[in-house]
Image: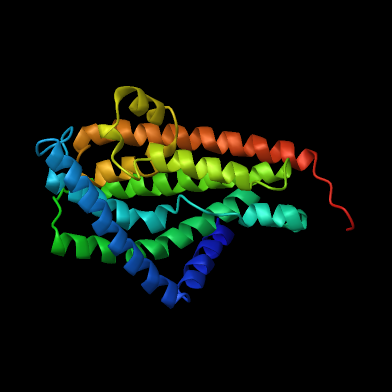
């Protein structure tokens, strides 16, 4: 366990060196948050002031919590394992005395621990000051929300890790990643809350792990799922976490059995 904690700390320190990228990320997330809020406010106004429980204040809370979670959850774009498969360096990783999946998982948690206060909180505070957000009805939303966020980050990592493992069978995974990003953006609740989808699309979303990585932490942190109502949300996240761990373990086991490194 100690070596994985060290990996998480090292990733935390590594990301702290990119100060200009942090400033650029805060600026981009804040501007994008105002755009998302404007679009959602317009839709709510056109619908008569509320859409499935989302009034302007709830919509603002959804948007700014979402902007705060974008960097920690990091749903998009990660090809490090795929790149190492393509260059053959994955053979060195597999020979190391650390578990490949746990090492990358620990590093991802270290990255998220740095991203949350530095890139997540500033857009949330700016949005709260300028537009306003609704506070959760109970203090339990904060500890339960933190648990939900850690689960969401872990589910996001396992999905991205699984996509990278496809490179053991086909070296170029760009087409798979493009399709993944397209479906993820729609079904995770990133564009609009999953709760305002038509019934058939909402059912399709909940049959995937994507709402558990983005919509679920927002629901718990905002108090939309508060108290005992938060436990079914956490239970679904935990179920997806276990399923994805088993799936990615099987993928790596199958991949390692057929791995051939040329020239070394």
Q: Is residue 13 above or below residue 150?
A: below
Left or right placement of residue 240 versus residue 144 in this view: right
Nearest the camera: 16 or 189?
A: 189
User: Which percent across, then down, holds residue 243?
Assistant: 52, 32
Q: Residue at x 61, y 48 (%)?
A: 101
**Is residue 57 among the parts visible in the rendering?**
yes
Specify the quadrant of the image occupied by residue 98: bottom right
Specify the quadrant of the image occupied by residue 138: top left
User: Which percent across, then down, holds residue 147?
Assistant: 34, 46
User: Which percent across, then down, holds residue 225?
Assistant: 22, 37
**Is residue 138 among the parts visible in the rendering?**
no
Q: Residue at x 40, y 58 (%)?
A: 71
User: Which percent across, then down, holds residue 86?
Assistant: 74, 54
Q: Is residue 127 above or below residue 53?
A: below
Q: Residue at x 22, y 33 (%)?
A: 228
Left or right placement of residue 109 versus residue 37 in this view: right
Specify the quadrant of the image occupied by residue 46: top left
Nearest the camera: 45 or 96?
A: 45
Q: Which residue is situated farthest in the front direction here?
A: 46
């Amino acid at each position: 366990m100690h070596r994985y904690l060290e990996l998480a700390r090292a990733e935390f320190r590594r990301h702290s060196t990119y100060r200009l990228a942090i400033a650029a990320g805060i600026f981009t997330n804040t501007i994008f948050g105002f755009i998302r809020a404007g679009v959602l406010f317009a839709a709510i106004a056109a619908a008569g002031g509320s859409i499935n429980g989302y009034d302007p204040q709830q919509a603002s809370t959804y948007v700014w919590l979402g902007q705060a979670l974008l960097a920690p959850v990091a749903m998009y774009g990660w090809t490090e394992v795929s790149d190492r498969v393509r260059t053959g360096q994955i053979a060195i990783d597999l020979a190391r005395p650390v578990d490949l999946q746990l090492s990358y998982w620990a590093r991802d948690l270290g990255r998220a621990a740095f991203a949350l206060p530095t890139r997540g909180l500033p857009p949330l505070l700016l949005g709260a000051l300028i537009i306003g957000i609704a506070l959760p009805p109970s203090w339990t939303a904060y500890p339960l929300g933190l648990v939900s966020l850690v689960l969401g980050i872990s589910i996001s990592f396992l999905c991205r890790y699984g996509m990278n493992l496809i490179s053991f069978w086909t070296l170029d995974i760009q087409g798979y990643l493009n399709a993944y990003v397209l479906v993820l953006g729609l079904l995770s609740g990133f564009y609009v809350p999953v709760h305002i989808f038509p019934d058939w699309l909402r059912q399709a979303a909940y049959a995937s792990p994507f709402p558990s990585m983005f919509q679920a932490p927002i629901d718990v942190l905002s108090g939309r799922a508060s108290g005992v109502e938060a436990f079914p949300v956490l239970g679904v996240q935990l179920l997806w976490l276990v399923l994805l761990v088993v799936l990615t373990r099987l993928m790596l086991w199958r991949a390692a059995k057929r791995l051939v490194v040329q020239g070394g």
